Image: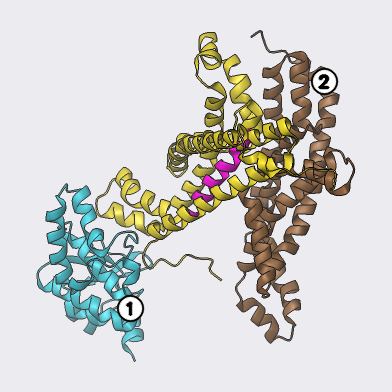
Chain colours: A yellow, B brown, C cyan
Amino acid sequence: MSSYNWNWAVLVSQPYLGWLLDGLATTVMLALSAWMIALVVGTLIGLARTLPNPILRGLATAYVDLFRNIPVLVQMFLWFFVLPEVVPPEMGHWLKRDLPYPEFFSAVMCLGLYAASRVAEQVRSGITSVPPGLSAAARASGLSVAQTYRYILLPLGFRIIVPPLTSEFLGIFKNTSIALTIGVMEITAESRQIESYTFQGYEAFAAATALYLSISLVLLFLTRRLEARARIPGWISRGNG
Amino acid sequence: MGPLDANVILRNLPYLWEGLQLSLLLAALAITGGILFGAIMSVLRMSSIRPVAWLAVGYVNFFRSVPLILVIFWIYFLVPLLLGRATGPFLSAWIAFTLFETAYYCEIIRAGVQSIPKGQISAGVASGMSRLQAMRHIVMPQAFRNMMPILLTQSIILFQDTSLVYVVTLRDFMTSVVTVANQDLRLVELYLFAAVVYFVICFTGSRFINRLGGSFRR
Amino acid sequence: MVFQNFELYPHLSALDNICLAPMVVLKRRRAEAETRARALLARVGLTDHASKYPLQLSGGQQQRVAIARALAMDPVVMLFDEPTSALDPEMIKEVLDVMSDLARDGMTMIVVTHEMGFARRVANRIIFMDAGEIVETRPPETFFTAPESERARVFLSKILGH
């Protein structure tokens, strides 16, 4: 290891420090935007998978099967390289030229809709783990099916799946690194760029690792607080011991 | 864009097939390594010796907090430095996947073991077995049965993730696809083809797991 | 309707369990629904437990909240599906007392139950069923002393015999 010249100072010198911070900002923006798509789409799809209507249920199942069985990297390429070519020419031109940051747009759609398929599975398992007697009770007291979802099944289901949902959120953060393959300059891409400019690869990767670990720690802290708030009083989760 | 050209795929089929074989080999080796070390790690994780358990927890949490791509980069750069010579991307990819997946398999195996009620060990001990025997003959078979579907699902995810070695230009299936796509300027055909191939393999795999899951349920 | 396993909504307090349907279905205002809910809780003897969550209550208390929840919809008839069969013996009485009070106040109730003493004391009419079919329908005095069908005779001799 003697041949390697360590130089940690490179991380705090410009422009490299600026690159890392830009990367952090991009990663956070990417993850948050994708998470919003994942939550909305995932909830709708997951909910549809619990409905009695076979057509809606089938469509939702097909969505989940499709997005879960293709690697995120391939999906990334489909959004970025393939989509603009297979839509009508004007729209393709808009996707490639007029969007301010097409790589970012593709990455958000890709990560968001992929995570939606995973969120959908959580939402479905949350809803189906609500004891069936509760929706019977709600219907018996006059609530409609929609009202039963709105007041009983969704609030309870979401509380049950808070822990897996937050780990999906962490998953999105990690998957943002795949966006580097289409040229989004997030944390990992920036650290790689520092490596190729300075040949200080270990320092650069160590910095990226430290950033991801801090993001995880922050998320862990927020998760704990969220779980404490979402806890149903008196509810003892199964599987303890 | 012109009409779709299927010939480009037929022409390059042997080349793409080689890539796919490498992907499958890498996945198989990484699954083996990951489950093996994951099992060892889960034993350490459940150890009653506190520092040992903490080390295992630290390992698992570390690898679950960082992206796989970053681990691939790390190992790609680190292995030659540690060994003092170039090793080629395949070995470093295998090491990266094994290290990374060990953390995930460890948690799956641990959850499987802990899902078995403690009374099962007591029952074994009461009938004259040692704790280790009870673990081996009573807990493990049940735990393995319970966690089989999740282990396999994780393995399908692992197979999908092998596409990420594209970033260190190991010639796996995805890298072959990208090479052909750029050579013949047929991005649409090639990326759609890649999606179909991965989908068919992974979807078939997950259907198989579902049926297996049904037969495992008692 | 009152269920064997209570089926209270675990994410809502006792008070909110009672208020939900009146607010959502009958479009009552929260203040109005709460006032009524508190009155109902008082009626089932749970004034102090309004803000507790279902899983913090005992089985008997949960079932009384469930009765209050059913009452909040101003039902014409109440259905009870084995309301005491998931309860410890000590808690059965507190639920049966509430139901006896309701009966005395003139509420029409259809109760599926194995509590023969309660049925005899409170019911106006006994419907004896076996395998999903009605075997006989009589006032309680005559059902318990002189059942018509052989099936009912066997049943009564088994459960009252000791």
Q: Along the line of sight, which residue is nearer the eye, C69 or C154?
A: C69
In the depicted structure, whether residue C62 falls above or below residue A59: below
Q: Along the line of sight, which residue is nearer the eye, B127 or A215?
A: A215
In the depicted structure, whether residue C29 falls above or below residue A72: below
Using the image, name the chain to which the residue with label 1 belongs: C
Q: Look at label 1 and name its amino acid.
A: Glu
Which residue is identified by label 1? Answer: C150
Q: Is residue B50 left or right of residue C4?
A: right
In the image, is residue B32 part of the stretch drawn in magenta? no
Residue at x 38% of width, y 68% of height: A234
Q: Is residue A39 left or right of residue B128?
A: left
In the depicted structure, whether residue C25 falls above or below residue A40: below
Q: Residue C2's x, y, as percent?
A: 27, 64
Q: Look at label 2 and name its amino acid.
A: Asn
Q: Which of the 4 image quarters holds residue C1?
A: bottom left
Q: Which residues are magenta?
A: A163-178
Total marks drawn? 2
Give the class, few, some or many, for how many residues have Cα within 10 Å of label 1's Cα (few <14, many ≥20): few
Q: Along the line of sight, which residue is nearer the eye, A67 or B162?
A: B162
**Can you say which quadrant of the picture contains the C terminus of chain A?**
bottom right
